[in-house]
Amino acid sequence: MDQRSSDTIEREAEAEPAEVAIELFSEAGSVEVVAASFAATSDPRLRRVMVSLVTHLHGFIKDVQLTEAEWATAIRFLTETGQMCSATRQEFILLSDVLGASMLVETLNNRSDGVLTESTVEGPFHVVDSPARDLGATIARDTEGDPCLVSGRVYGDDGRPISGASVDVWQANAEGFYDVQQPDVEPDRNLRGVFTVDDEGRFWFRTIVPRYYPIPDDGPVGELLRATSRHPNRPAHIHFEISAPGMRTVTTHVFVDGTPYLDSDAVFGVKDSLVRQFATVDDPYQAGEVGLPNPFRTVNFDVVLKHVDQSTARD
């Protein structure tokens, strides 16, 4: 790894001395030569990103003494990753997820400060428009799985409930599949829905308890996991994306307490604050009130959003 920082290299690349010898590519000076090629980039953020990328990429190649065959394998892997992408599958998101990059970007850009609802990865299956549904409606269009009532309330960071917030939800079924994975088996838009909270910020809907599942592992990302002796599984969870005017949108999950893989999520998405008990209610009267068979499961998930006018821009 080059000892100097990418910021130092960037400043040197931007310098324009009156007379300077043309430096050609060499092993020792590779970073400086390539970084200098970005000196005329008009967007300063793009220039900073590209110089840093070159600094770390060249440092990595030198650190592991990458062979030509290994680099060719890497190019093949990335090519096959792109070829695997489709309208209902994003293999590059899977790659980002299993490398922890998705979670790191989420965490850097959505710090909760111990007050806000923590974010986690969106995942590769938020790929269709979810249907708008009335509060209390069911998102389960088949009858498989343990019936469940999900409820919660959306607050601002000032502690006041937010009316009119949008709650977009999607999840796997009782066998661990999303509707887009089984287009010929599951009903269209199964286990998806967008709800608008009431005047007091409340939302509730009916669904089933999801199952843990493996991320798609029949492509290059699965090949990578097997080569590194890693499993592809994610713990059971329900996805949420909550938004409201003037608030910072949060993309998050509710994880089912006790599900397998909470401590070894393949995409590193679990945070303690997002794990909830899905308690069993055995009461025919309550079941009748919420329109579910008895017994049923229930979980509450309150959400706290940040006012955007209080956000501090990052450097």
Image (tube, rainbow, N blue to C red):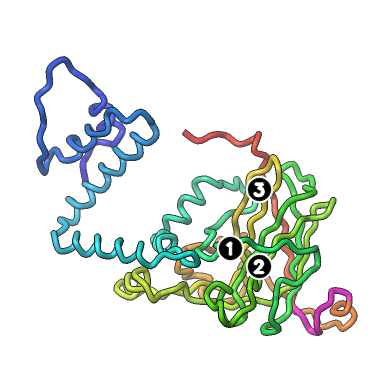
What number is the disc on residue 128?
1
Contact flag, marks 2 and 3 (Cβ < 8 Å): no
Q: Amino acid at mark 2?
A: Arg
User: Quick check: is 290 in the magenta stretch?
Assistant: yes
Q: For the residue carrying disc 3, how many other residues have a C-alpha within 10 Å: few (<14), some (14-19), or many (20+)?
A: some
Q: Position of residue 121 (x, y in %)?
A: 52, 59
- The three-letter amino acid code for the residue at tag 1 is Val
Which of the 4 image quadrants contains residue 202? Answer: bottom right
- In the rendered view, tell whether residue 123 sits above or below residue 278: above
Give the quarter of the image for residue 12: top left
N-terminal of the two: label 2 or label 3?
3
Q: Position of residue 269 (x, y in %)?
A: 51, 62
User: Residue 117 at x, y = what percent?
Assistant: 64, 53
Please rate how many residues cluster around mark 2, counting C-alpha atoms within 10 Å: few if below 14, some from 14 to 19, many from 20: many
* Residue indicated by mark 2: 192
- Mark earlier in primary sequence (3, 1): 3
Q: CA distance from mark 3 to mark 1?
A: 31 Å
Q: Secondary structure at mark 1?
A: loop
Q: Residue at x 38, y 67 (%)?
A: 84
Up/down of 34 relative to 226, above or below: above
Q: What is the secondary structure assignment of the residue under circle 2? A: strand
Instruction: Pick whichever of labels 2 and 1 is earlier in the sequence.
Output: 1
Q: Are marks 2 and 1 in contact (CB under 8 Å)?
A: yes
Q: Amino acid at mark 3?
A: Val
Q: CA distance from mark 2 to mark 3?
A: 28 Å
Residue highlighted by disc 3: 115
Q: Please state the extent of the stretch shown in magenta in the rendering.
A: 289-296
* Alpha-carbon span between mark 2 and mark 1: 9 Å
Question: Disc 2 or disc 1, which is closer to the eye?
Answer: 1
Q: Is residue 15 above or below residue 75?
A: above
Task: Specify whether residue 214 is painted magenta.
Answer: no
Residue in view at x 84 percent, y 74 percent:
290
